[in-house]
Amino acid sequence: MVEYGTIIDASGALIDEVLVVPMLAPRSYTREDVIEIQCHGGGICSRRVLHLCLEAGARLAQPGEFTLRAFLNGRLDLSQAENVAQLVSAKTVSAAETALAGLQGGLSLLVQSLRAECIEMLADIDARVDFDDELPDLDTISLIQRIQKAQQQVEQALTTERRGKLLQVGIQVAIVGRPNVGKSSLLNAWSQTNKAIVTSVAGTTRDVIEAGIVVGGFPVKLLDTAGIRDTSDEVESIGVERSIVAARGADVIVMVVNAKDGWTEEDTHIFDRVLKIREMSSRVAQSMLVINKIDQASASTIAGSKFANPFDKVVATCATQRVGFEDLEAAFLELVGTGNVIVGGKMWAVNERQAEQLLRASKALERLQVSIKQNLPMDFWAVDIKEAAVAFGEVSGDDVSEEVLSRIFSKFCIGK
Ligand code: GDP
Ligand code: ZN
């Protein structure tokens, strides 16, 4: 039902003509009575109406308060609530679809069934701790099978973390290589095919150039760095410094070489720097070799050499004629698109917090199997299985502290 009416202030003066949508419990987002007032656009009307509501005794919602209430009233579990925040902040369609899959309960169902399984096993074990003699022995072989199956499901869920993070945060790609191999041309050609916004971070060509594009649904930031090489030229060394920083934070390092010149000593030097950067990086950076200028010479000399071996992917391009970019994107997506879990045809992903708890559960299940195999007293089994159940409860929100809740919901924006 939508009601039409007017909003007036205390003196009876007309403030706005509005539509009011009553959403009565339990059929609302929070399962509480909710009234939505739809004002005229433009900001002034809504601000005046809001002001009147506040004067009449309403208060502004805290960040995430609607979703928190929905969670507390059992409308959503905690992992679904977290996906609301991810849905709202999604930068690409794929990121939104992944969050939606999570919101629809893909992960919730899995975690709830895992938690229920743990609680069931715990009940079996507890019963035998308490009434030792009256019950038949536990079938430890089938118990271990149940634990292993649970553990496999946890491991599978954990493989979605990287994909989820890359979808949400985006993929940083550092393009490195010696001067003139075609780094800037590569960035331009790749971003033109993807309608990028290219921004030069500061005035000189030696600074980092950024292009934001979408590849296979992932938000991608291409960074064209100044040529990495040792230099005494001060301005250039600043550029080199930035290149190294950019490459260090990168998820994918793209090294460009030139088919015409072949692999040069300077390339080896840069490659060594890149390897060092990879070692220093906290992220798992992957690497791609782009052999450019294939209009001038064949890529096969470098591609077939030992120099190409250490790279995760090797592709050939002609940046000026935009040749090879389909292969480049396909190779790129193979590098980053790992760990897809499909539940009910939908792809969801776990976030860092959920992954942390799933890892904790996995470790507890591992210890549990050892305790059983070593025939330790059942009290020990109970400790580990309880730990796993609590970890699952932290994901679903069945077993979660106030502190964790406020940390999660404070990151929401107001009105969600
Ligand atoms: P960077 O210094 O590595 O950024 O290299 P640039 O992108 O500025 O390119 C250096 C020169 O090589 C420019 O004149 C480009 O037009 C040219 N270039 C880039 N890619 C190609 C290519 O695939 N084929 C040919 N023939 N020239 C290219
Ligand atoms: Zn350049």
Image (cartoon, rainbow, N blue to C red):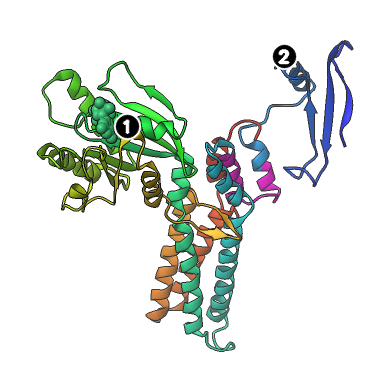
Which amino acid, mark 2?
Ile
What's the residue type where badge 1 is placed? Thr
Ligand 1 shows up in which quadrant of the image?
Answer: top left
Question: Quick one: SS at disc 1?
Answer: helix
> Which image quarter is the N terminus in?
top right
Asked if the residue at label 1 sits under 8 Å from ligand 1, the reply is: yes
- Residue 239, given in percent of the width and then of the height, sits at 23, 24
| Rendering quarter of residue 190 | top left
Q: Is residue 5 above or below residue 255?
A: above
Asked if the magenta segment contains residue 114, the reply would be no
Q: Quadrant of residue 243?
A: top left
How far separated are the C-alphas under marks 2 and 1?
51 Å
Is 83 magenta? The answer is yes
Q: Is residue 141 above or below residue 209?
A: below
The residue sitting at 35% across, 43% down in the picture is 324
Sequence-wise first label, 2 or 1: 2
59 versus 357 height, above or below: above
> Which label lies toward us, 2 or 1?
1
* Quarter of the picture holding the C terminus: top right
**Residue 236: % across, % down:** 19, 22
Q: Which residues are magenta?
A: 69-87
Q: Main secondary structure of the magenta part?
A: helix
**Crowding at mark 2 (Cα within 10 Å: few <14, some 14-19, many 20+):** few
In terms of secondary structure, where does tag 2 sit?
helix
Q: In this image, 168 relative to 37: left or right?
A: left
Numbered circle sitting on residue 142: none
Quadrant in which residue 258 is drawn: top left
Q: Residue at x 80, y 22 (%)?
A: 56
Please name the residue that numbered disc 1 is placed on: 320
- The answer to whether residue 245 of the structure is visible from this angle is no
The residue under label 2 is: 44
- Is any part of residue 273 visible from this angle? yes
